[in-house]
């Protein structure tokens, strides 16, 4: 059996502390650690967990097969390193995603978000609002997931009115964060699937950051997966 090698792209804060490991070949897969060494140590298990999730949701992947990893790029200068710094542009982000890759990413977005919602469905209000010693409450995580998703898409594809309306309704208290997350799935998936050739290939500046379709897809899925895993661990999964 051929052993696969995944390239790792790292971003680390000062003194190689808080680190996020990105696996662009597996759009959405990340690992975190309070130091670079700890993040790298956590990476194989994070890859295996993500492969299992994708296989369970219909992708033809060998979740049990052997693989290796190698560090390809390590960014140590930026504004918000270790947290998914929006200014970071890795080499693979400049590659033009194919229509098949876009469709695959759209379905991953749907699968991750729907699975996140399935984990919190039926939780009592006190469990949703309970504040841990570190980080957001589960309800706070759900609310946090609404805005970045539409902003990542907007950065490359422009405004998606349906997503803006949902976010505005949540901010006004007309719907809950979980309801907003659910209502955003289809408009987001439809807009990703409708991406044009020009949109797939262009580079769009936003302040200090440069965005491409590849970077947008990577960060959209990474952010969803990071907080999916945060909730899963919080609930003892």
Image: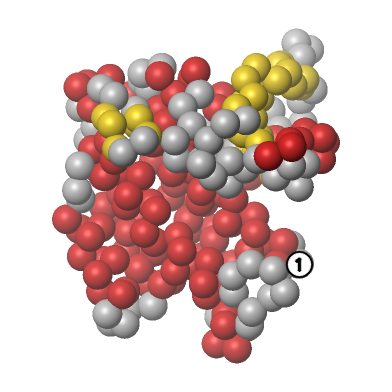
Q: Is residue 140 above or below residue 26?
A: below
Is 204 situated left or right of 83 in this image?
A: left
Which part of the image, by quadrant, shows the N terminus? Answer: top right
Task: Tell me the residue that label 1 is attached to.
Answer: 236
Which residue is situated farthest in the top direction here?
2
Q: Position of residue 76 (x, y in %)?
A: 62, 30
Residue 170 placement (x, y as % from top left): 31, 74
Front residue of 210 and 122: 210
Number of residues whose C-alpha sits closer than 10 Å to that of mark 1, classed few (under 14), some (14–19) or many (20 or more): few
Colour scheme of the picture: secondary structure
User: In terms of depth relative to the viewer, which is nearer, 111 or 74?
Assistant: 74
Q: Is residue 58 visible?
A: no
Q: Residue at x 23, y 38 (%)?
A: 157
Give the x, y percent position of residue 152: 35, 44
Tell me which corner region of the image, top left, top right, bottom left or bottom right, holds residue 52: top right
Place of residue 204 in the rendered image (x, y in percent of width and height, measured from the top left): 27, 30
Above or below 171: residue 126: below
Question: Along the horizontal axis of the image, is 218 left or right of 36?
Answer: left
> Relative to 30, is 43 on the left or the right?
right
Measuring 29% from the left and 24% from the top, which residue is drawn there?
203
Number of numbered tags placed on the structure image: 1
Quadrant of the drawing holding the C terminus: bottom right
Which residue is at 57% across, 56% downward? Answer: 227
Which residue is at the far left? Answer: 161
Q: Quadrant of residue 6?
A: top right
Q: Secondary structure at mark 1?
A: loop
Q: Residue 9 occupies which quadrant of the picture?
A: top right
Q: Is residue 106 above or below residue 7?
A: below
Q: Residue at x 26, y 66 (%)?
A: 166
- Above or below 152: residue 89: above
Visible residue check, residue 229? yes
């Amino acid at each position: 059996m051929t052993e696969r090698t995944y390239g790792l792209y790292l971003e680390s804060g000062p003194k190689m502390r808080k680190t996020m490991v990105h696996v662009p070949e597996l759009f959405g897969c990340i690992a975190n650690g309070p130091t670079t060494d700890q993040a790298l140590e956590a990476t194989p298990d994070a890859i295996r967990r993500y492969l299992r999730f994708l296989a369970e949701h219909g992708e033809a992947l060998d979740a049990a097969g052997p693989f290796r990893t190698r560090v390809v790029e390590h960014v140590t200068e930026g504004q918000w390193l270790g947290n998914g710094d929006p200014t970071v542009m890795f080499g693979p982000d400049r590659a033009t995603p194919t229509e098949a890759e876009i469709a695959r990413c759209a379905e991953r977005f749907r699968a991750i978000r729907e699975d996140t919602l399935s984990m919190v469905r039926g939780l009592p209000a006190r469990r949703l609002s309970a504040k841990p010693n570190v980080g957001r409450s589960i309800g706070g995580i759900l609310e946090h997931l609404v805005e970045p998703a539409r902003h990542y898409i907007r950065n490359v594809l422009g405004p998606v009115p349906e997503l803006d309306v949902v976010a505005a309704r949540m901010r006004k208290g007309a719907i809950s964060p979980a309801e907003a997350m659910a209502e955003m799935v289809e408009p987001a998936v439809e807009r990703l699937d409708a991406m044009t050739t020009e949109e797939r290939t262009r580079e769009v500046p936003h302040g200090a950051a440069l965005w491409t379709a590849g970077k947008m897809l990577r960060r959209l899925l990474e952010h969803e997966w990071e907080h999916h895993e945060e909730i899963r661990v919080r609930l003892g999964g």
